[in-house]
Each structure stands twice: as structure tokens, then as C-alpha cells.
Amino acid sequence: MTNGKWLIGCEESGRVRDALRAVGVDAWSCDLLPCTENPSKYHIQDDLLKVIKSEKWEAIIAFPPCTHLCLSSNRWRAEKIADGREKSAIDFVEAIWDADCNYIAIENPVGVLGTKSKLGKATQYVQPYWFGDKHRKKTGLWLKGFPKLVPTNMLDISKISEKELNKLYYLAPSPTRALQRSKTPHGLAQAMASQWQGVV
């Protein structure tokens, strides 16, 4: 294992944690939920901001909830601004960004972070099909210390049906729909691990 521990925040699935551990990084996932996809002793079920302050982390990669930040919830945005949910969500992300850590990556879909938070414009936007996953989801990465990700397995989406590319949007309503849509694609997790593990 490399020196120093990495914290993967708001990650219930453990996919990025496991990809990093596979390449020799002492990575730990953290979420309010238990890690059910791949239960591990390297998962901390607790409040992320509390865990960030609990020790010195070598790097932090965070996937904060996008419910009150993404453009897909625009129809309820006025209500979320009025009752403080949007500001609370932005404050949470800014607190992660302000952590005492030289290497921070924050992932979130297109939304208000780029215009309403101190993070400003995303460092880059990526798509799952850049990394071999057959679906479309434009995702922003705000990077401090980390380089931009380079595509590893660019798929020709002209040969993939729109239904398959947008399968995340077509998931039937269910109690687990939001959780399913928020899971980091395996290809993206592998790219983060392979391209960032040697940077810190």
C-alpha cells in the first residue's frame, strides 16, 4: 500500500475504493449508508465531514448527493432555494472542497455547483462511454491537485441504441432508483484508480 490514506466520500457502492485498493492505495469509503454492494471492513458508515476532520487524509474523492444540485431537479428549484435545501447542499460540497488536503476530486452532474458555489466551473466533464460503459451521463469533476482524466476505452455511441445509452433515466420508479443512478460506473472508477494513484 502507498503511504497515506485516501477517503472516498459519499460512496455506498465501494467501487472507487476497491479499484484504488487493487492498485495499492489504502482507500476507505465513507457514507451514511452501509456498503451493501461489496461489504468491506474498509467502509466507514458515518458523516463525511466528521470523518474528514478525524485524521489527515492523503487524498479525498467525493461523490456528494446531487438531489438538490442537479439540473434535472430544476422544476423544484425555487422551492429548494426558499427552504434552504440548495444552500445546504452547496455548503456541504464547499466544506469538502475546503478540507485540509492537497488532493481533492468532487464529482457531480451538470447543476448549480458551477455557478452558485465557490468551486466555480468544473475542471472537466466526462461521460461513462469514454471508459467503456454503455451509457450516457455528463458528469463534472472539480479537481484540486489531480490531473484531468483521459479516456481509456472510448465507445462509438453511434452503434449503441438511445435506449441503452439512457438506461439510467429509464429506470422504473422504486425506493432504490436514486441509489442505482448514483453508482459510479466501473470504467470511471478504474480510470480514477489507474490515472490518479501515482500522482499523490
Image (spheres, rainbow, N blue to C red):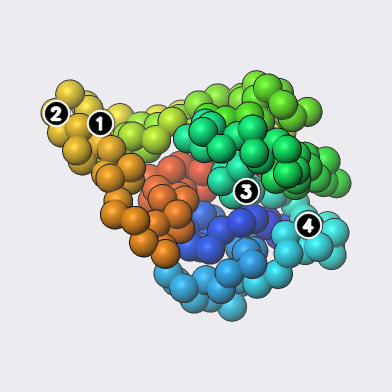
Q: Is residue 85 left or right of residue 188?
A: right
Asked if 47 appears above or below 65 in the picture, the reply is below
Q: Amino acid at mark 3?
A: Pro
Label 2 to label 3, Cα distance in Å? 32 Å
Counting every numbered tag in the picture gives: 4
Mark 4, secondary structure of its residue: helix
**Residue 155: assigned label:** 1
Disc 4 or 1, which lies upstream in sequence? 4
Residue drawn at x 64%, y 67% as measured from the top left: 32
Secondary structure under the numbered disc 1 in the rendered image: loop
Which quadrant is the C terminus positioned in?
A: top right
| CA distance for labels 4 and 2 | 43 Å
Q: Is residue 197 above or below residue 141?
A: below
Label 2 sits on a secondary structure element that is: helix
Amino acid bearing label 1: Leu
Marks 2/1: CA–CA distance: 9 Å
- Compared with 195, 157 (above or below) is above
Marks 2 and 3, the one that precedes in the sequence: 3
Task: Name the residue: 59% across, 49% down.
Answer: 65
Q: Residue at x 34, y 56 (%)?
A: 173
Q: Are the residues at dot 2 and dot 1 in contact (C-beta closer than 8 Å)?
A: yes
**Alpha carbon distance from label 3 to label 4:** 11 Å
Give the foreground label among 4 and 1: 4
194 left or right, relative to 46: left
- Is the residue marked by circle 2 packed among few (<14), some (14-19), or many (20+) residues within 10 Å? few
User: Label 2, on which residue?
Assistant: 159
Residue at the spot of label 3: 64
**Where in the figure is residue 91, as x and y percent of width and height?**
78, 42
The reply to whether dot 1 and dot 3 touch (C-beta < 8 Å) is no
Q: Residue at x 69, y 49 (%)?
A: 60
